[in-house]
Amino acid sequence: MALLEMIVNGRTHEIDADPERELLYVLRDAIGLTGSKYGCGEGQCGACSVLVDGKHRFSCVTPVGEVAGKEVTTVEGLEQNGRLHPLQQAFLEEDAFQCGYCTPGMLMSALALLRTNANPSTDEIVSSMENNICRCGTYPRIVAAIQRAARTQAEG
């Protein structure tokens, strides 16, 4: 065990954890942020997606020791001052989820995309999101939501 400092959604946390412990479990169990989901445990489904220093990471295969001192953003960190992030709003407006299990990971992966490409094409969205699995099959609505969020951010 080691005392690790990490910044999650703008708040500093000191965590006593094995540095090899998966970030997903530290977020869920030690910090109480349950938005990131366990899906496959192998970094293949995207349900656990977070951003680390603004870059997409699968938290189920990322040792917490690798993120010590870095900024971690989870789905809980998207809403600001009671206002949904444009991606969250777009997912609502496009009905881009059914069961919602994959949605936090989809949002985080889409955010990583939009931070590097503010106006992605449909093909770029599909390619960027291919490591996120939606068992309900709402892929067309997810693409539409990301396109809507891109337009909203360009207008604002």
Image: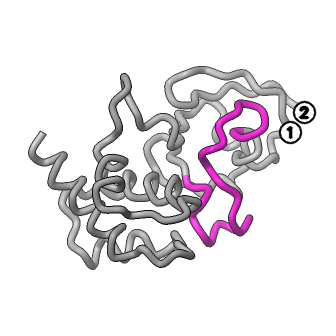
Per the image, label 1 sits on a secondary structure element best described as loop
Towards the viewer: 155 or 70: 155
- Residue behind mark 1: 18
Residue 42 appears at what percent x and percent y? 71, 68
Q: Residues within 10 Å of mark 1 (few under 14, many from 20)?
A: some
Q: Say what amino acid the circle numbered 1 marks.
A: Asp
Mark 2 and 1 residues: CB-CB less than 8 Å, in contact? yes
The residue range painted magenta reads: 27-49
Q: Quadrant of residue 46?
A: bottom right
Q: Quadrant of residue 43?
A: bottom right
Per the image, label 2 sits on a secondary structure element best described as loop
Question: In the rendered structure, does residue 141 fall within the stretch colored magenta?
Answer: no
What residue is drawn where x is 67% and y is 43%?
66
Towards the viewer: 87 or 19: 87
- Residue behind mark 2: 1
Task: Please tell me which of labels 2 and 1 falls first in the chain.
Answer: 2
Q: Left of 75 or right of it: where is 6? A: right
Secondary structure that dominates the magenta span: loop
Residue 3 appears at what percent x and percent y? 81, 25
Question: In the rendered structure, does residue 46 fall within the stretch colored magenta?
Answer: yes
Q: Say what amino acid the circle numbered 2 marks.
A: Met
Towards the viewer: 40 or 136: 136
